[in-house]
Amino acid sequence: MGDRDWNPLGYKTLYRELFKKHLNRQEMLMNMKRPVGWFFAFHPSELIYVFDLISAFPEQYSAYCAARGSSVDLIDASIATGYSHFLCDYFKTTIGAIIEPEKATKPLIPKPDFIVGSRALCVAHHEMADVFARYYNVPRFVVNYPYWTSDSLKNVDELTKEAEWADELYVEYTVKRLQKLVEFLEGIAGEFDEEKFKQVFKKSERTSKLLIEILKLMMSKPTPGSQREIGDFVFISFFVLGSDYALEFCQKAYEIIKERVKSGEGVSDERYRLLTFGIMPWHSLSLYEYCERMGANFPVNLYVNASVHLVDSKKPFESMVRRSMHFTNSSYEMLESIVKTARKADIDGALLLENTGCRITSMIIRPLADVLREELGVQSLILDAPQCDPRVMPMERAKTQIDAFIESLS
Amino acid sequence: MEGMEMREPFKNFYRIFRKREKITEYRNEGRKILGLLCNNIPEEIIHALGAVPVRLIGFYETTALANSKAPSWMCMYSRGVLEGALRGDFDFVDGIVSATTDDTKIQLFSSYKFYIKPSLAYLIQFPYVKDSLSREFFEKELERFVSILSKGLSAELSDEKLKNSIEIYNDYRKVCLELEKLRKEDSPKISSVEWFALILSSLAMLKDDFVKMVKEELERLTDFEGRNDFKIRIHLSGTDFYHLEILKILEECGMAVVSDDLCTSAGYYTGFVEGKDLRAVAKRYSECSACVMTLSHSGLSIEERLRFIKEKVRESKADAIVVLKDRGCEVCGHQCPWIVREADVPVLVLDLDFPVSVEQYRTRIEAFVEAHGGG
């Protein structure tokens, strides 16, 4: 199999700008001695900007450690302390960094003044929040989103998360808990500014629309971009949605991909279109490039798709609830929305990453593979791929499996 | 009491459990059976609607079918249930009920529903938080549960029926506490194997029948000779545990298990419903601190669990704790180091997976007993 030209969108520079602005903001707020909060994926990130909070994300920090090579030592430190091997890599890496900071990649994640736990993706987030709060002896607030089932949610759009119907009982309770979160944050960071809240949500709405448009454009033929670039969208949609710099990033990123699609250029000479799902293996992102160089492109990354939602600035609290209406937080009948996306993207196969220790993403993998095979007649390759532990996914082994899979598609 | 052999009437209870004798009987009577995937399901509601709530448990040494549909590192409980479901061993079940108490219970619910397609399936949404807003929500959630279940079972819930079921379940809890006393005497009258034979049987029959059967035997049990041949009194900690084989090893090595906080034992029956309506049921299930996932307004769930364990250890005069840490259990995985660190007594952690490495366990247990077992 030949090595084809690889032609990414060039978002690297945009990400660099984004991170720089994010870090500048953090530094400025540090100097102002603003409180530090720890948050998890699918939390209402807009509130960080409403309250001028310094935000820290154990998941993002762990991904950073994985990319820099320190996560293995940190995972080992956590297991040596008695935490189980089959727990989330993000948890093990962060705990490792707390217990043995000298082994962790610098700069270290700042110590929290408070923690916001949630269950918009997993109970593990809530359990982690408990453990971290106990280590640091800081207040912890829990937002409990429902796990959506076929009797509580109907016909969700896979990208926007707009639903034909959602049970009011759950929406109302979650909205009330989110309002309580605002009260909790007021107690920590000072008075709530209504006007600022509106402005942040307007920005969030514009950003969310652009994110969705970009992901729709990714489904063009040929696939315009690389998952090495698109994979990092989760940082924007999970953690900095509502910021100026997220909006700026998305505006530029949208223009770039729009032009790319207009010109009919692809990330590589496309032979196969693959759907992918699973938390990205942050230690080995070259995996995507490897596939793309062989002409196997990824018009759909369901994990990235799960991270976005359409924000309605006129209904901010309902939008925060909508954030939880992704297929990884829904019973498996909801996989029908995935089939629609996969059909639209005209996929030839799927590369599914089983994240050891993550029950949410791993348990749904085989049903997903079954649905894709039964509904679309496409095959899946399932790889053991914990997001921070490269020992379980040696690249050479992964490449061999991918080679064989791609050969089977021809 | 000499040796580790299970005596009557425990043998009888265990046979009822393993052979599902009562369940077969109920089915033959035309009753609907609902399989539960968690200990924290408000069974009173199911019972009051005329159905039979039973805990689904799968005993398999290998779980090849489950491993083809879910990761092999998941907890033994979930693999066992999925294996049983895929083999068709749970065909006696008309529906399933689970709860959002941990990730595995949620995903197991989805997986079961996806592959087996039971006609009735409900996932109870727990609020985790114990403030008034969440309590109110949980009451409504149980009303929703009643409404969906009533439709599925073609039955109606009345105040009277619910009151009656609450009384039966409270009776059951009283009986368990009575039995607990025999277990934690200075010379324990019930061995751990016998204890679990008894308690597990209660998960596979109507509580009315269990209470009746136990009451008939209670006098006989009280007269049993206590056990004096042990070296150390143990509190057993963990989640969904049901393997008597491991208990046998503990006992053979000189341990007497006098209390526990397991989801299939004390974590299940602890806590009365104080009241006669749905509101009281909601209060009991959202406040039950025996569960590893509930948490108070002021504290963390780990702290609640530690308090529960320490209280159990104190009451039972346990000398040490043995943690049965299922390798795939997320709850054990997060909480175990805290139990080890903060317990007031020595702790032995046993990593659990199947097939059981008998000799490895035995060596570790013997060494622990030697170190902490006194004379």
Image (spheres, coloured by chain):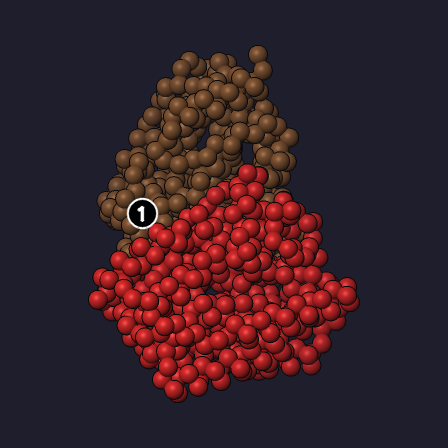
Chain colours: A red, B brown
Say above or below: A269 vs B195.
below
Secondary structure category for the residue under label 1: helix
Q: Residue at x 39, y 72 (%)?
A: A6
**Quadrant placement of the N terminus of chain B:** top left
Q: Say which amino acid is labelled 1.
A: Asn
Q: Left or right: where does residue B137 sit relative to residue A277?
A: right
Question: Quick one: B347 or A143, which is closer to the camera?
Answer: B347
Q: Nearer the viewer, residue B51 or A2?
A: A2
**Is A375 situated above or below B15?**
below
Q: Position of residue A105 (x, y in %)?
A: 61, 53
Rendering quarter of residue B314: top right
Query: Relative to B8, is A93 above or below?
Result: below
Answer yes or no: is residue A166 visible: no
Q: How many marks?
A: 1
Image point (65%, 46%), residue name? A102
Residue B65 at x, y = what percent? 27, 47
Quarter of the image that includes the C terminus of chain B: top right
Residue A97 or residue A265, whichever sits in front = A265
Q: Position of residue B237 (x, y in %)?
A: 51, 35
Q: Is residue B209 visible?
A: yes
For disc 1, the neighbor class at 10 Å (few under 14, some 14 to 19, many from 20) is some
The residue singled out by tag 1 in the image is B67
**Chain ID, mark 1:** B
Q: Residue at x 55, y 50 (%)?
A: A70
Relative side of B272 to A151, left or right: right
Which residue: 49% across, 48% down? A87
Q: Which residue is outermost to the right?
A: A32
Q: Position of residue B363 (x, y in %)?
A: 45, 22
